[in-house]
Image (tube, rainbow, N blue to C red):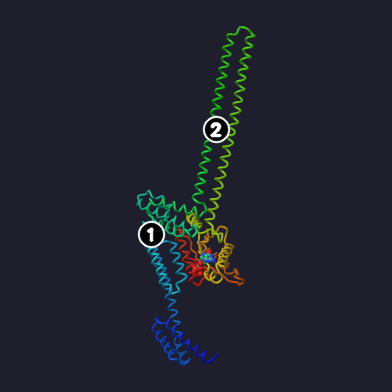
Amino acid sequence: MTESSSDKLIEVLRKAVSRTSMLAEGNDPELDSVVRQIRQAVNKGAKAQEIQDVLNNAEPLLIKSDEALTDRAKQVRSTLQELIDLLERQTSRRVPQNEKKQLEAQIRSNWQVSSQWPQLLKGFLTLAENTLNQPEDITNQSKSSFLKRFFNRNSDSAPKNNDQEIMVQISHTFAGLMNNLSLPSIYDEDIVDLKRALLGNNNIQQLPGLLDEVINFIMIAIGKTQESLTNYLTQLNKQLASINESISTSYHSQKSLSESREGFNTKLQMQVEDTSLAINGIKDLDSLKSLINDRLSTISSTMTEHRAQMIEQEKHSAQSITSLKNKVTRMEKDTASLRTLLQEKLAQAMTDSLTDLPNRTAYQDTILPLCKIMQKTKKPICLAVCDIDHFKRVNDSWGHLAGDKVLRLVPKQIRSVLLKEDLMFRYGGEEFVIAFPNTSLPQAIERAEAIRLAVVKTPFNMQGEPVSISISIGIAELNAQEEPESLFSRADKQLYLAKEAGRNKVMGNK
Ligand SMILES: Nc1nc2c(ncn2[C@@H]2O[C@H](COP(=O)(O)OP(=O)(O)OP(=O)(O)O)[C@@H](O)[C@H]2O)c(=O)[nH]1
């Protein structure tokens, strides 16, 4: 290096030290004074040894300031979490769970980045504001089961409030359903509007209109348009009309069959009566013979005519019965194929397409009855919330497709350790939920430990390089009377602690 280029380099380094020293300022008065000394030394062009001495003095203070910053970050994180918990405990309104989860995830990812603190606080304020905009949960009853409250609605306790509460429940349930529909992004704004209308709604008069809109979106999501369903119903209606016609034709032909049978009997009876009257006036055998021959041939032709008529009518009714049968069979087939289609669509709506696992909607449908059964039979059940550690880094380093591959492989490893009766769901993103029925907390922790090991020991391969993936797991055991939301929230808190404790850990608590 020439002298002038080394001078330039030194000049650049001086500037860099001088500027970066400003960053450390304002954290601690003691550190500030050392920082100022550094800058003065650098600016006046002090010798390297002098600068080195000042820097040596600064080092322990910088470490101290760094630790203080981490402590502050921890304080910010726990204060934010306490604020969220407080909001949930203190207000008589329902905290929007999705927003809450999102905010908690943001806190988990960003608590160490001080520039993000205002953003996190703003997030909390928005959550608080949105909570306060929620319709009020009238009493503590809101924490008991919806059905219990529904069936108690005729009791003396504030029936009007109960109605309103049920309204809120229904609106929330449908708003939740909207969250789980996968719809093209052109509907994003409409869905946000509809969810807002549902969540802010406590007027029963508005519910049918809103539900109509929800149904329209479900139709779009399951790939069946309102129009094609209407077509199907019109078709069905036509088939029913035509069956109705066949039945009335068949009824008429049956009627004319019995009328003609009656007519034939009367005719025959009259002919027999005529014959017996005529016989009374006959004096000789020949006339009698000819009369009887005559009458018998009349009776015989009446019978032939009647038989032909009967055959014709029977043929006609057999035809209409066959056509009726065909129509019913066709209708049954159509209905069966529509049912299969709807079942397939429903199964699709319950399955996560990336991992083939039951999704969050399926979780929500399953967990309440499962918890109720376990509580009724007094058997233990544990819930584990599992989250892939530093998953963002996988996406950032190896790309989204590699991230997807990990998302498919991790549940396969988890499954290899699960029992037949355990249930696993993709709750969202890189989060999986496992229900361990008939399992106490210590047993569930042991099982989760096996799951954690199975994942961390799996050699994942990213573009030819082996990469180790780990998961953190939080577990809670269901208490008597507890609602699934609270069980999930306790397990999620344990997950948060597992992440806190350095990740690749299992944490559980009663
Ligand atoms: N590839 C892929 N990435 C996803 C999917 N769903 C969510 N993600 C990503 O998962 C990442 C989750 O990151 P964070 O919530 O910040 O958490 P993390 O990086 O796992 O870190 P910790 O949970 O704190 O250990 C985000 O980058 C999402 O974009 C998906 O279906 N496929």
Residue 253 position within the rendered picture, expressed as x and y whole percent measured from the top left: 55, 30
- Answer with left or right where residue 36 lies relative to residue 427: left
Label 2 CB less than 8 angstroms from ligand 1:
no
Of 20 and 164, the residue lying toward us: 20
Of 282 and 68, the residue lying toward us: 282
Q: Amino acid at mark 1?
A: Gln
Of 349 and 317, the residue lying toward us: 317
Graded by Cα atoms within 10 Å as few (under 14), some (14 to 19) or many (20 or more), the crowding at tag 2 reads some
Residue at disc 1, secondary structure: loop
Q: Which mark is residue 250?
A: 2
Residue 143 position within the rendered picture, expressed as x and y whole percent measured from the top left: 41, 57
Residue at disc 2, secondary structure: helix
Q: Residue at (63%, 17%) from the top-left corner?
A: 297
Taking 50 as reference, is 145 above or below it?
A: above
Instruction: Give the quadrant of the N terminus.
Output: bottom right
Q: Which mark is residue 379?
A: none
Q: In the rendered picture of this protein, how many numbered marks are placed on residues?
A: 2
Label 1 CB less than 8 angstroms from ligand 1:
no
Residue 395 position within the rendered picture, expressed as x and y whole percent measured from the top left: 54, 69
- Which residue is denoted by mark 1 in the rendering? 134
- Answer with left or right where residue 126 lies relative to residue 467: left
Taking 8 as reference, is 262 above or below it?
A: above
Q: Are marks 2 and 1 in contact (CB under 8 Å)?
A: no
Q: Is residue 54 visible?
A: yes
Residue 73: name its quadrant: bottom left
Taking 425 as reference, is 243 above or below it?
A: above
Residue 9 position within the rendered picture, expressed as x and y whole percent measured from the top left: 50, 88
Tag nearer the camera, 2 or 1: 2
